Image: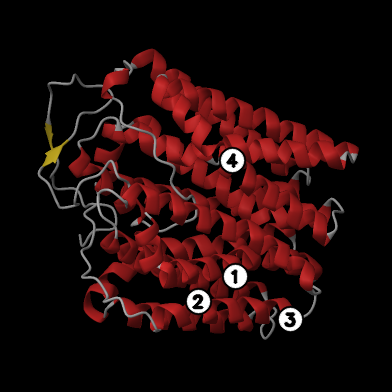
C-alpha cells in the first residue's frame, strides 16, 4: 500500500486540493446568496445547478477523455472550474450563479473521472481496496476541512472566491508535473434503469432518495445555518461535524451489515438518521447549540454510510464482473436525486418555514426505512454466506469510483444479467434489451 500511495502522491494531492476548494465553494455560495438577499427558494434552484452539471459531466466527460487524454482533460476542466469560481463576484445574479454552478459541477465530474481512472490504473488487485480507503479519506476529509476555510475571510467579500480559484489551480500542478504515464481510458457500460431496478429495487430507490437528501443537506445547510442565526464559525463546524461523523461510523456500520441482512441495517440506520435529524431540528428551535452539534454529528454518522450500504446491497445480487456497471448506474441515480434535493427543500423552507429543513431530511430517511421494511416482507434475504464484503465508498465522487472496489473484476460489457431480489439463485436473465442504458450512446 505504501508504494502505491507514494507513486500516486501527485494525484492524491491534487484530489485533496480539489476537495478543499469544493467543500468551501458549496457552503460559501449558500451563505453569500443569503447575504445578497436571494429568496430561499431561488437559492435552492441555484444550488441545484452544481448537481445538474455533475450529472451532465459524468455522461459527457468519458467521451472527451477517450479522444483527448487524461492530462489535457484535467488541465482544461481545472482551468474552467478555477475561472468559473471568480465569476460569482462578477455576476451577482441568480441565473448567472446557476450557470456558474452548472459549469463547476460539470468540471468536477470530469476531474473526478480523470482521477479515478488514473487511480484504478495504478492500483493492483492487492492494493485497490487500500487505495479506495485513502481516496475516501482524502475526499471526505477535504470536504470537511474546506468548510473551515469559511473563517479566513468575510463571505461578503471576494477573497474566499479567489481562494477557491487558487486551490483548484494548484491542484493542476502536481498532476501536470508527474512522471507517471497517463493510462488508457475505457468507458463503463451502464445498466438501463429497468434492469437496475429489477436487480435491486431497494438499492436503486435508496440511492436516489439518499442523493435527494444529500443534495438538500450539502446544498442548503449553510443557508439554513445562516437563517437560524449561526455564526460563520458555527456553520462551518456543524457541516464539518456531519461529514466527520459519517467517516467515523462508516466502517462499524459496514461491518455490521456483513453480519446481518443488509436490509435490516439500512432500516435501522435510516430510522436513527431520521431521529437524529428531528433532534437537530428541535435543538435548533430551542437554541441548544451543544445538542444541535451532537445531533448533526449523529445524523452524519448514520446517514453518510447509507450510500455505501445501498451499493453493497445491490452488489449482493451481482457477479463481480457486473458490479462496476451497476454501481455506476446507481451513482447516476444518486446524482439525479441530488439535483432535486436543494430545489425541494428551498421551496418548502420558503413556503412553510426554516425548521422544515431537517424535517424533510428526517422524512426522507424514514421513507427509505419503510421501503426497506416492505422489501424484507416481500423478498427473501440473501444468505449471509453469499453476501459480499462491505466496501466504504466516498459519497462525493465520480462514477468511476466503483472501479476501485476490490470486490469487482476488470470491467467489461457482459451479456448476462445477475439475479434480482425477487428471483431464485438459479434464474438468469439477459442483460441486453432494446432499452437504452443510462448514460450510454443510445
Gap between marks 2 and 3, in whole Å?
A: 19 Å
Q: Earlier in the sequence, mark 1 or mark 2?
A: 1
Q: Which residue is mark 2?
A: 171
Q: Quadrant of the N terminus?
A: bottom left
Gap between marks 3 and 1, in whole Å?
A: 13 Å
Q: Position of residue 50 (x, y in %)?
A: 53, 64
Q: Which residue is mark 3?
A: 159
Q: Are marks 2 and 3 in contact (CB under 8 Å)?
A: no
Gap between marks 4 and 1, in whole Å?
A: 22 Å
Q: Position of residue 240 (x, y in %)?
A: 68, 52
Q: Position of residue 427 (x, y in %)?
A: 13, 24
> In the image, 350: left or right of 106?
right
> In the image, 347: left or right of 224?
left
Q: Earlier in the sequence, mark 2 or mark 4?
A: 2
Q: Which residue is mark 1?
A: 21
Q: Earlier in the sequence, mark 2 or mark 3?
A: 3
Q: Are marks 1 and 2 in contact (CB under 8 Å)?
A: yes
- The answer to whether 281 is drawn above or below residue 21 in the figure is above
Q: Earlier in the sequence, mark 3 or mark 1?
A: 1
Crowding near the residue tagged with mark 2, few <14, some 14–19, many ≥20 C-alpha atoms within 10 Å: many
Q: Secondary structure at mark 1?
A: helix
Q: Which residue is mark 4?
A: 248
Q: Secondary structure at mark 4?
A: helix
Crowding near the residue tagged with mark 3, few <14, some 14–19, many ≥20 C-alpha atoms within 10 Å: some
Q: Nearer the viewer, mark 1 or mark 2?
A: 2
Residue 38 seen: no
- The answer to whether 392 is drawn above or below residue 200 in the figure is below
Instruction: Give the residue at x 69% y 40%.
Output: 297
> In the image, 116: left or right of 39?
left
Instruction: Give the residue at x 73% y 41%.
Output: 356
Amino acid at each position: 500500500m505504501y508504494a502505491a500511495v507514494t507513486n500516486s502522491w501527485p494525484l492524491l494531492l491534487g484530489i485533496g486540493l480539489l476537495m478543499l476548494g469544493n467543500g468551501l465553494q458549496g457552503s460559501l455560495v449558500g451563505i453569500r446568496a443569503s447575504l445578497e438577499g436571494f429568496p430561499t427558494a431561488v437559492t435552492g434552484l441555484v444550488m441545484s445547478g452544481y448537481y445538474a452539471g455533475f450529472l451532465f459531466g459524468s455522461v459527457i466527460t468519458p467521451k472527451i477523455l477517450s479522444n483527448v487524454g487524461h492530462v489535457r482533460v484535467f488541465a482544461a476542466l481545472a482551468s474552467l472550474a478555477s475561472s468559473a469560481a471568480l465569476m460569482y463576484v462578477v455576476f451577482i445574479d441568480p441565473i448567472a450563479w446557476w450557470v456558474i454552478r452548472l459549469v463547476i459541477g460539470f468540471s468536477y465530474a470530469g476531474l473526478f473521472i480523470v482521477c479515478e481512472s488514473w487511480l484504478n490504473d495504478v492500483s493492483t488487485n492487492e492494493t485497490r481496496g487500500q487505495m479506495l480507503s485513502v481516496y475516501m479519506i482524502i475526499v471526505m476529509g477535504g470536504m470537511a476541512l474546506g468548510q473551515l476555510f469559511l473563517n479566513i475571510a468575510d463571505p461578503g467579500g471576494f477573497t474566499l472566491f479567489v481562494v477557491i480559484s487558487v486551490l483548484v489551480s494548484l491542484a493542476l500542478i502536481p498532476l501536470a508535473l508527474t512522471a507517471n504515464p497517463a493510462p488508457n481510458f475505457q468507458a463503463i457500460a451502464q445498466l438501463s434503469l429497468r434492469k437496475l431496478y429489477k436487480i435491486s429495487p431497494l438499492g436503486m430507490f435508496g440511492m436516489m432518495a439518499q442523493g435527494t437528501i444529500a443534495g438538500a443537506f450539502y446544498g442548503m445547510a449553510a443557508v439554513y445555518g445562516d437563517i437560524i442565526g449561526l455564526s460563520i464559525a458555527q456553520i462551518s463546524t456543524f457541516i464539518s461535524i456531519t461529514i466527520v461523523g459519517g467517516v467515523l461510523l462508516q466502517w462499524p456500520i459496514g461491518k455490521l451489515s456483513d453480519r446481518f441482512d443488509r436490509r435490516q441495517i439500512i432500516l435501522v440506520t435510516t430510522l436513527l438518521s431520521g431521529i437524529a435529524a428531528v433532534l437537530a431540528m428541535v435543538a435548533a428551535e430551542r437554541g441548544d447549540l451543544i445538542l444541535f452539534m451532537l445531533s448533526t454529528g449523529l445524523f452524519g454518522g448514520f446517514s453518510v454510510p447509507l450510500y455505501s450500504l445501498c451499493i453493497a446491497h445491490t452488489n449482493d445480487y451481482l457477479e463481480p464482473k457486473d458490479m462496476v456497471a451497476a454501481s455506476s448506474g446507481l451513482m447516476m441515480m444518486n446524482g439525479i436525486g441530488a439535483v432535486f434535493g436543494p430545489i425541494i427543500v428551498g421551496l418548502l423552507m420558503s413556503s412553510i418555514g426554516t425548521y422544515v429543513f431537517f424535517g424533510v431530511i428526517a422524512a426522507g430517511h424514514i421513507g427509505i426505512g419503510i421501503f426497506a421494511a416492505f422489501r424484507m416482507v416481500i423478498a427473501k434475504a440473501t444468505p449471509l454466506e453469499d453476501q459480499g464484503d462491505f466496501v466504504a465508498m466516498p459519497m462525493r465522487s465520480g462514477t468511476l469510483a466503483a472501479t476501485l472496489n476490490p470486490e469487482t473484476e476488470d470491467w467489461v460489457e457482459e451479456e448476462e444479467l445477475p439475479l434480482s431480489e425477487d428471483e431464485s439463485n438459479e434464474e438468469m436473465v439477459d442483460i441486453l434489451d432494446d432499452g437504452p442504458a443510462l448514460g450510454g450512446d443510445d
